[in-house]
Amino acid sequence: MKGLYIHIPFCIKKCNYCDFASYPSLISKSNDYISAMLSEMKLYKGEKIDTVYFGGGTPTVLQINQLQTLISFVFSNFRVLDGAEITIEVNPCTINKEKAIELRKMGFNRVSLGAQSFLNDELKLLGRLHTSDDTISAYKHLSDAGFNNISLDLMYALPNQTNKSLSTSIEQMLKLKPNHISCYGLKIEDGTPFSLMEREGKIKEKSDDEYADMYEIISKNLLEAGYKQYELSNFSLPGYESKHNIKYWTLGEYIGIGLGASSYYKGKRYTRTYDFDKYLESFENAEEYELSLSDKMSEYMFLSLRLTKRGALKKEFASYFGKEITDVFPNEIKKHVKTGMLLDLGDRYILSKKAYYISNSVLCDFV
Ligand code: SF4
């Protein structure tokens, strides 16, 4: 079954670390953008989907009637399975009691709330517009509105973050009892205000050791609190894993709608243009590429090994590609099993716990 991703490229203000496709100044053209997205969705009329994900940008900067137009069209244009997971990303400063109630009424049943940190000086440096109290109020509005599947985003390795302040954020976050937590380590991306601040010596990226220490603090605290780590950056209570995101890690098909949105549809991958005006002129502009067999096999390993318990399934790999994992990646498997980074569980390979800290270097060997 396919997933559907809807990209809303508007925010109130660009955060200092952000290199996502979000353009605060273009919100005045949101109605034109919505019309273009409705036309794009018609290309996939009648497709069966079991997950919907409104991401961004900040979907909740749209007005209630605009979100209603979009979600109603999703339900009329696609065959949305009963019980589908329908997620919307929410920025804490763009939600109030009324909006939370309306979102629930529209059919959203899962929220990804961008908390990032519970320390106001860290939020300020990130360029976030909300405070820790805003996150706590947003969470309450959403729970009161009937959302019982809320995920919180937490960032670590921030320039002004310490192990102690990270622990404080985790403690605050756990008090809210979210069912799901996504953790992102900060990487300073070119072209962002952070990259300029780094060049000017105002901030510094954390070292690999500091990064690993913070990852360990998160992992230890969340596991102790009863969360399961089902993906390298994602923790959930049992049964609350993100069904939509699991499609990305298991080569499931998904349809991406909107500016810069990627799709994996009928065996092809394509990405819509990042140029806003071009998208409005002709949303069908897309960079399309068919992955070679060798790219597909690499991608399978790179993505499936991120799933900590599931890992890379030997039979599944053979049925997809007609070859054994060990025939395609003999040296990589041998090297990482020998060093204890990969565990051979008989029917699958998974990353060992010690590999979580250096996962990129292990996963990149398969690319
Ligand atoms: S709210 Fe998210 S998408 Fe918008 S600028 Fe900040 S990080 Fe980027």
Image: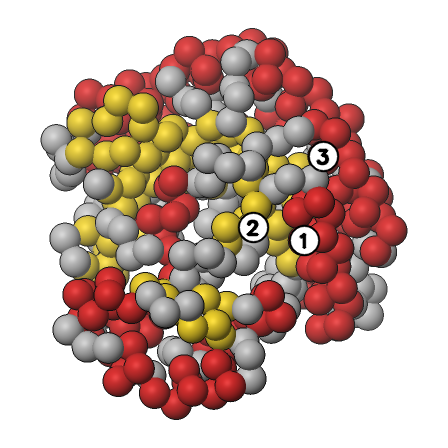
Q: Mark 2 highlights which residue?
A: 229
The residue that appears at 54% across and 58% down in the rendered structure is 232
Residue 106 in the image: state x and y as whole percent. 39, 15
Instruction: State whether label 2 is within 8 Å of ligand 1.
Output: no
Q: Earlier in the sequence, mark 3 or mark 1?
A: 3
Task: Inspect the image, locate mark 1, and give the three-letter code of the amino acid beneath it.
Answer: Ser
The residue that appears at 33% across and 55% down in the rendered structure is 250
Cα distance in 3D space between marks 3 and 1: 13 Å
- Using the rendered view, name the quadrant where residue 341 is placed: bottom right
Task: Inspect the image, locate mark 2, and give the three-letter code of the amino acid beneath it.
Answer: Gln
The residue that appears at 76% across and 64% down in the rendered structure is 213
Q: Mark 3 highlights which residue?
A: 174
Number of the label disc, if any, that sits on residue 219: 1
Residue 179 in the image: state x and y as whole percent. 57, 32
Say left or right for 365 vs 221: left
With respect to residue 353, does 184 lie above or below? Answer: above
Does the residue at mark 2 contact the one at mark 1 (Cβ under 8 Å)? yes
- Locate the C terminus and report the quarter of the image it occupies: bottom left
